[in-house]
Every structure is written in C-alpha cells, then in structure tokens.
Amino acid sequence: MGHSDRWDAGPLGGTNYSWQDFESFNAWLLSKNLPPLQGRTLPDLIAEVTATTRVNQWYSWQMEHYVSNIRNLRDSFTHEGKRLLLTAQGMPTMPLSAAPEIDSVVRGTSDDNTWGEAEQDLIFTTGRQMAANALNPTLGMATLNQWQWVSGVLQNFEWHAPMGTTEPAQRRQYDRAFRGALRPDGTYGSMSVYGYNTNGGIGYALNEVDYNQWEQTMIKQSLLFPTAPIGAGVIVSNAKYDKLENALLDCGDGSLFPEMHLVQNAVRRLSYAGLSVSFSGNAALLAGWKNNAALVLLNLQDFSDAEQAAISQMATAGRPLVVFQGQGTPPLSSAMAALFGVTTDGQPADGKTVAQVEGRSVVQKGNCLYVPAELGSMSQEETNSLAPILHPALNQVITFPQGTTGYGFVSNGRNFAVVEDWREEGRMAELRVKASPTASALQAVETNSNLPLQTTKDGNDWVIHLPIRPGDASLVAFKEILP
C-alpha cells in the first residue's frame, strides 16, 4: 500500500494539534500518573507541548500511539492471511526500542535528494540518508533513481521533466550508490536495500548516451553490493531517546534529531577534506560487528555504558578511533576520557597535542584521536587543515586527487573506489592506493568505459592514472597482485 501522504511515513508530532490529540494525550498523562495539561485554549495547549517539559512527554505519547496504530493495521491484515507493507518517502526516526516493529511494516522509504536536496549540496544530502540508517538501522530504504536531476533549485520548476547532462547525473547516482550501513544482525551492507524509485519523472531530452549510462549505473548498483568498507564510518548513539525525558519522534526527514545534523556535517566536511567516508552506524551495533575499519565517533558523551564498553574493547584491540566533541556538550565519562588521553572536559592529559582547532588542543593517544570541536561548527578550511592528521589516524587506504571526493568499498572480495570530480575540469588525475608490502603490481579498470588504467608505484603508494571528464564520477575497480 502507498501511504496516504507519500512524503511522510507516520505522524509529525509538530503538526498534530487537534482537540482529539490533546484529549488523548491528557488521558495518557493521567494513566502515567503525570500532571494533566494546564492550557485551556488551542494556543495555550500548543505552547505547552512545544516549549515546556511536556515536549518529550508529547513525543513519547506520539510514539506509543504510532506503534499501536501500526500494530492494529498489521494484525488486521494478518487476520485475513495478508502481509501489510506501507511505502512512503519519509524516513521514520525514533528510539531503537520501537524501530523494529515499525520498520517491519513501513518499508521502501527513501530520502528526497531532488526537491529536498539539503543546502544544494549533494554530499550533505547523502549524509542525511546515512544519518537515517545510523539512527534507525532496521530501515528498509529504497534509493531515488532520478537521472539528470542535478540541482534542487534549477529543477524546481521542471516538474517531472528533469533536464541535465550525463556526467553530473552519473556523479549524483554514484555518490550514494555504494555507501554502507551496519545492520542489526551484525552484518555490513548497502544503505539502500529496497530497490529504486523516482519522484521527478523521466526527462524529455534524454538521448541514447543518457539511457545507456543510466542503465549501466543501475546494473552496477544492483550487482555490486558493498560487503566491507574501504574507508571510515561515522557512528552515533541514540540510546538516550528510550528515556521518557528525552523522547523524540520524526517521520519526515529526521531533522528533529541533533544526531542527524552531526552525521550530515561529518560526511560533508570529511569528504571535502579528501577522506573516504564509506558507511554509517549506530553505536549499539558495534559490539556485534567484526571488522577493523576506522570509526569517527560523533556524540561519545551520549554513548550508553554498553556502547562505551564496546569502544574500550576496540581501542584496546588497536582500532583507529577519532572523536569529535563540540564545546558546551556534556563531559566525557572518565573511562572514555582516559582512552583519548584527555580530561573529562577535553583538556590534554597524558595524550600528545598534535594540532589546534578553535583555540583548543587536538590530542592523540596511540590509535585514538580527540578533536575538541563538532564538524558542523568547523569551517571546511579548518577541516582541511586537519586532513594530514586525520588521513593516517583513520587509516585511509585511498588518497583522492585534488578537486575530487569519493569513497571506497569491497564487493565480494573486489575493491572499488568512487571518484567524483568537483573541479569540473577534464584532466588526467592520480588516484593513490596504499600498497601492501608483498604486492608486486596493481591492476585497475575504469568501469564506466571498461578500459584498463595505467598504474605505477610511488614510494608506499600505487598510483592509478585516471582520466576525468568534467563533473563526472568514475567507478574504479582495483586489485593487487600478490605472490
């Protein structure tokens, strides 16, 4: 079934202000032995549930109401021997405890990267979908397969008639095509698992080249399923939202959750700084995931005791860990502060100061790096200045050419790198891959053209000589030759 409003996958707590809602909410408060509503007019009641301690109670009631309604719908269909699936474009974002039951019914959700492109920034918008998968790991998300829709502003008046060119259309598809996510069963896979959809139609100006390239990108995205990352993952915790005093629910774009913006900013800033950000994940899943990929921890101060224990085990095992913590956030626990060589308020302790950001010390202790700022508050220039430190701290295998961004992934034992051109200038570029000590050669193929690429050795790196078309993206397959 298609949802009655295709844009939202459930209730929007900031708009459900009918008298029936307030009566039901008041009854819920009384059933929980909480003080009843005090307002007597609609403006007073709206103010009470949006600007007081009632806010989290309001969202907690919305959550219980939502789960109850979904359960009743599901059971009604089950009684008739049918399975109910609801599809919608919104991304239900909620506490982990409620997500599995909702997501067993609400499937095929997707993120709007057309009209809904965030800040006219493709990578920032991809970060929103990565954030949704991190906050709600049981999401069954589709991916928008919208060819030639290359601008959220310029296309607004072209309803169901996208007009663009081949290269940036390909870049748009590749940016999210092979990003990964941690799954609740401890596996790693694509952040898009429910096929393709489109909300902007098919352009009238497509030519043979466009149709061929569009088909090729779909074939690759369908057959090349990411099974491991070649790059870092951004990790957040939303454990605190299972407590009544913190409850939140957002069935639109997830923007009510501050963690959504943490992930978006991290993906954007780190990507433009030349780092491979391959996946996102929820801190609750780390204990069950067996991989040694580097992790970027975005709200370590909010991690639960169990999540902190998993981080301690990873640090002891030598996992590369980088934490970003903004000023004004709650202090780290003593255990986490000790891991990163800082005090609980982020001042250097037994760690080594390796840089400065926003007037404070960036501290390294072994395989752990502490950055005393949120990526959202840092400028791109400040992030770029830390790239020489972040690149080795995050154990980056790939070094992207100047003027490009990208990420790496493994698909069934084969290595791939997406390389996106943002200089929009045709040229021959050097894509670098860290060489294994025993490898004798590197083979590489540009899969858009299916042509082999020249490779050379430079110090500890393999150099792939990659021809770049303006505004395009390449999918490069590479393999080391080992004895």
Image (cartoon, rainbow, N blue to C red):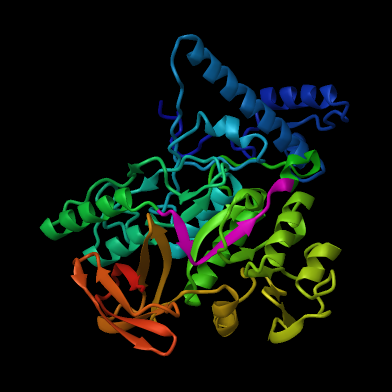
- The number of discs equals 0
Residue interval drawn in magenta: 226-239
Asked if residue 186 is positioned above or below residue 126 in the image, the reply reads above
Tell me residue 402's x, y (percent).
Answer: 40, 83
State the residue in front, 155 or 114: 114
Quadrant of the image occupied by residue 96: top right
Mark yes or no: residue 287 visible.
yes
Q: Is residue 238 magenta?
A: yes
Mark yes or no: residue 129 visible.
no
The quadrant of the image that shows the N terminus is top left
State the residue in front, 216 or 260: 216
**In the image, is 128 to the left or to the right of 372?**
left
Asked if residue 152 is positioned above or below residue 363 in the image, the reply reads above
Tell me residue 325's x, y (percent).
Answer: 72, 68
**In the image, is 309 to the left or to the right of 293?**
right
Asked if residue 102 is positioned above or below residue 131 in the image, the reply reads above
